[in-house]
Amino acid sequence: YGEIPMEGRPHIPYYQNNIINLGSVAGQTKPSTGYTFTRIQDYTQGLAQNLIQGFDPLPPQQSKFKYRYYDLLLLHILSNSTEDSLRVFQSLFKKNNFDEIFRFLGEETNFKQDLKIMSSVPYMPFFKAIWKNL
């Protein structure tokens, strides 16, 4: 409690009658950054529409593979090199505007936008992470 779960393993939701999990307990927290806000907003909007129409609530959708892989690489960097982590985040926020960063964190980017973000950060830590996670 009071901690953001920054890990790549699946989250086990809490189940009880008439309880709908949201946020971290529903696995909506982005593992590498803790970013949850837009994921909760998107899910609750769809949830409300389902409930109004009399449908059962759907579970939150899992991230696309590419975002899960990006998270895996960044988590590797965060857990293995404070210096590289600092350089990655400094470059990310220096070389991109907030709208681009939030679209990326919200998993709303296409591959071209992903490449723009990726090209703005030091590449060597990511190559090392790819090598270690083959």
Image: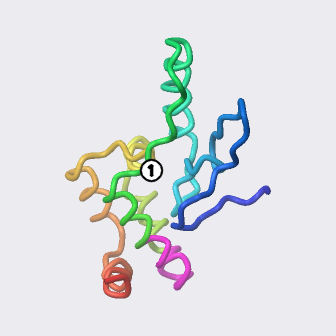
Q: Residues within 10 Å of mark 1 (few under 14, many from 20)?
A: many
Residue drawn where x is 27% and y is 65% of the image: 119
**Residue 107 to residue 50: above or below:** below
The location of residue 80, given as percent across then percent down, is: 53, 85
| Residue extending furthest toward the top | 53
| Magenta stretch secondary structure, dominant | helix
Measured along the vertical axis of the image, is residue 71 above or below residue 20? below
Q: Residue at x 65, y 35 (%)?
A: 20
Residue drawn at x 35%, y 74% is: 122
Q: Image point 71% across, 30% down: which residue?
A: 18
Depth order, front residue of 69/80: 69
Q: Is residue 106 above or below residue 86?
A: above
Part of the protein shown in magenta: 74-86
* x then y, percent, for residue 130: 32, 80
Callout 1, which amino acid? Leu
Q: Depth check: 29 or 128 in front?
A: 29
Residue at the disc numbered 1: 105
Q: Position of residue 99 (x, y in %)?
A: 41, 41
Q: Is residue 13 magenta?
A: no
Q: What is the quadrant of the C terminus in the image?
A: bottom left
Q: 22 left or right of 126?
A: right
Given residues 103 and 66, the one toward you in this image is: 66
Q: Element at badge 1?
A: helix
